[in-house]
Amino acid sequence: MGVGTGGGLATYREVLRLPGLTPLSLVGFAARLPVTATGVVLTLHVAVGLDRGFAAAGLVGGAVTAGIAVGSPLLGRLIDRRGLRPVLAVCGLAQAVFWGVAPLLGPTALAPAALAAGLLVPPAFPVVRQSLAATVPAEHRRPAFAFEAMSTEVAYAVGPGLGTLVALALPGGPGLWLVGAAFVLASAGLARLDPPLRAAGTHPGDQPAPPVRSWLRVPMLVALGATAAAILMLTATELAVVALLTARDEAAWFALANAVWCAASLGGGWVYGAVRRPPPTAVLLGLLALGSVPVALGGPWWSVTLLLVPAGAFCAPALAAAAETVGRLAPDA
């Protein structure tokens, strides 16, 4: 399972030379930043700005996460039927409305509003992955998905850190409105790029969609379940870190802790994309779970930061492996 540094660099250089991949990666990265900042911004707004504690903050954060989980496949169906740009227009408008009125809402009203907003979060993550699955040749897909997972980790390093700074420096309306503006720009950027989501020469309606039962079988369900489990673990870990640091009046250290967490994930993703025979998805998911549990035992900010290293090492590999499997098993139509 060894790999040389030169071989790894050459592998990723070949991927980046593929037509359209560089602009897709850049726009996709920028579009992910407000998504990755949402959880920490809403958490700090409710727990600190509104002084309602982390129970109420967790309810709001869980609502938006649930909305994203439910809304993603629904948006995918709408994109298949109506195209990417109309869906992005609706998502951008929905985010502008939610973040525009969020400062006026208390936690009781904010939770259902966050759920509704989560349903219409611009689908930056699935759009990038679907475009990779449709346009990247099979021999380059594993390093391409690994690079995508590493890009995601950089977004998770930058987004929550920026979100923390925004929530603490611009509490209330200004900070929330800034996040809303970022969502609008993200929707506009993806719409302007309009990346291909199907293989060249195919269009919606060219052939009837295959029956769901022909592809939604045990392997696909396992891959989807692995993706959902990984995302839930990452969300829970992020909220736990915010709660631990805020309880000790060390919230300002979150950006550093998060950067270390994501740097560890970047290293793991780099190795995963370059090795010839990576571990199975189930093994990577199990290692992610084992590495994440000790974070709950953290005390001062430096101990939390150190405990995030083993947790982060398997983030990008687990997400990349699950995304690659879903892309391989999903039908083109």
Image: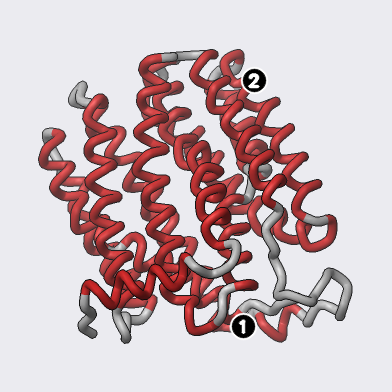
Q: Which residue is mark 1?
A: 217
Q: Amino acid at mark 1?
A: Arg
Q: Which residue is mark 2?
A: 100
* Residue nearest the viewer, comparing 221 with 165: 165
Classify mark 1: residues with Cα within 10 Å, few (<14), some (14-19) or many (20+). few
Which of label 1 and label 2 is nearer to you?
2
Placement of the C terminus among the 4 image quadrants: bottom right
Classify mark 2: residues with Cα within 10 Å, few (<14), some (14-19) or many (20+). some
Q: Earlier in the sequence, mark 1 or mark 2?
A: 2
Residue for point 60% across, 34% down = 183
* Residue nearest the viewer, comparing 147 with 278: 147
Image location of residue 61, percent across then percent down: 48, 37
Q: How many marks?
A: 2
- Marks 1/2: CA distance? 42 Å
Image location of residue 127, percent across then percent down: 62, 57
Residue for point 34% across, 43% down = 157
Image location of residue 3, percent across then percent down: 23, 80
Q: Amino acid at mark 2?
A: Gly
Residue for point 68% across, 42% down = 120
* Residue nearest the viewer, comparing 46 with 20: 20
Is residue 202 left or right of 39 when viewed as pictured?
A: right
